[in-house]
Amino acid sequence: MGPDWFTVIAQIINFLILVALLKRFLFAPIVRAMDRREAEIASRLEGAARTIAEAQQERERYETLTRELAEAREEMRAKARAEADELRKDLLEKAREEVDRSREHWRESFRGERESFLRSLRRHVCEEVCSVARKVVTEMADSSLEERMAACLERRILEMGTEERGELSGHFRASGREIVVKSAFELSTGGRTALARALNSLTDAVPLRFEVEPSLVCGIEILAGGRSLAWNLQEHLVDLEERLDEALGKSPSIPLS
Amino acid sequence: MELSPDSTILWQWGPLRLNATIFFTWVVMAVLSVGSWLVTRRLTDEGKMSRRRNLLETLVIFLNDQIRATSRQEPGRFLPFIGTLFLFIAVSNSMEIIPGFHPPTGSLSTTAALAMCVFIAVPFFGVMQKGVLGYLKHYVKPSVFMAPFEIIGEFSRTLALAVRLYGNIMSGTIIVGILLSIAPLFFPIVMQVLGLLIGLIQAYIFAVLAMVYIASATSVQKKTDDEKRKAG
């Protein structure tokens, strides 16, 4: 039952040999490998921490860049929007001015055309009316009418105010030349006498010369030194023309827009 | 029935005789050494770890943790001794299920040898740490009258170590042998499974107790260092 001391000693030796063998083949290599791995893991962890720190820095940098980019983009967008607004306002303003100018131009053009048309119309109307009147008067006119005209002119001279008469006589005297009396027809003796009487009441010693001027249509014109005194139908016709002109000018205008 | 494989003599030459205990010890040593060599011969830090290497590393980590928990010291110095104790006893006990294998731990000679190794290792590690006088001082603390009891304690716990392991393993083997003669079919298998569990537990107990004894010697040294530091 007791221990076999030879076996005990042998087992002690065996055990010590086993300790050496396991230390050589098991514990030492495994512990070394574990230490190496731990060191490697520590170094990898350190590297990973460093990488994470670098990544963090990079992330912060990129976040900053992104933020700056976004701000710059926003700023550029705002600037572009402001410029676009400005440009739009400018263009609208220019377009509006252009439209106004075109409208004004068109109005001017229209007004011009209307004026031209009205002028032409007026001229035509006047010409037609005057032509009719002239025709009527020409057809009706004769020397007796001329005499009536001479009488009428004499009455007008005689009925002039003192101031006007003085001015006219002064003018006749200043001319110092002859007084020309123009008429559309050859004046009768009575008409010539009446006119001479009237003119003599204004001034003396100025020779009278009577001429026939068909363009007067129907009437008498007294010329002396650039000043004229007349009674003829032409005057009335011009007056008629003026009134017609005025009447047509006041006609309701065509709306421009 | 033979109670100990010591009595089975396989070969004898003069006073030298090879009994079953020594032979099966060599078998266990060969299994452990060759197995370790096969795993650790090509250790690389790259690539995937093999399962066997993983198993060995797990075992080493387990042993380190146990040593650290028991001794509260770094396990590096103690690992070869304590680890070999544990592995030798655990593998011996586990190979009990192989037919014809007689676990060396079922021999009182083997357990006595292991206990004597522990008996020597305790003062060895203690003296390594604090010198002979320093180690011997703990026998006379707290009083010189305690020295006989300390010495008796050293012997008795060595004896207890040897007998505990021997008794457990030998009894397991004996019980299986007896049951085989009584109920040869299934019951011995259950007992063998129980024997495996007991074998591993005994290996653990033996290793932990050895560590406790060594730690008690080295912790004295540690306490002395603390006292010196306080005095200084």
Image (tube, coloured by chain):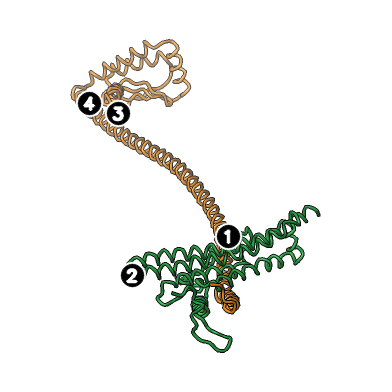
Q: Nearer the viewer, residue B134 or B167?
A: B167
For marks 1 and 4, give the one nearer the viewer. 1
Amino acid beneath label 4: Val
Crowdedness of circle 3 by 10 Å Cα count: few (<14), some, many (20+)? some
Q: Tell me which chain the residue with mark 4 is part of.
A: A
In the figure, A125 relative to B180: above or below? above
Q: Nearer the viewer, residue B109 or A146?
A: B109
Amino acid beneath label 3: Glu
Which residue is under mark 4?
A129
Which residue is under mark 3?
A213
Task: Quote the CA–CA distance across marks 1 and 3.
Answer: 124 Å
Q: Secondary structure at mark 4?
A: helix
Which residue is under mark 2?
B184
Query: Is residue A116 visible to the viewer in this orientation of the structure?
Result: yes
Residue A145 placement (x, y as % from top left): 23, 18
User: Drawn colour of chain A?
Assistant: orange
User: Drawn colour of chain B?
Assistant: green
In the figure, A62 relative to B96: above or below? above
Disc on res. A50? 1
Amino acid beneath label 1: Arg
Q: Secondary structure at mark 3?
A: loop
Residue A121 placement (x, y as % from top left): 25, 31
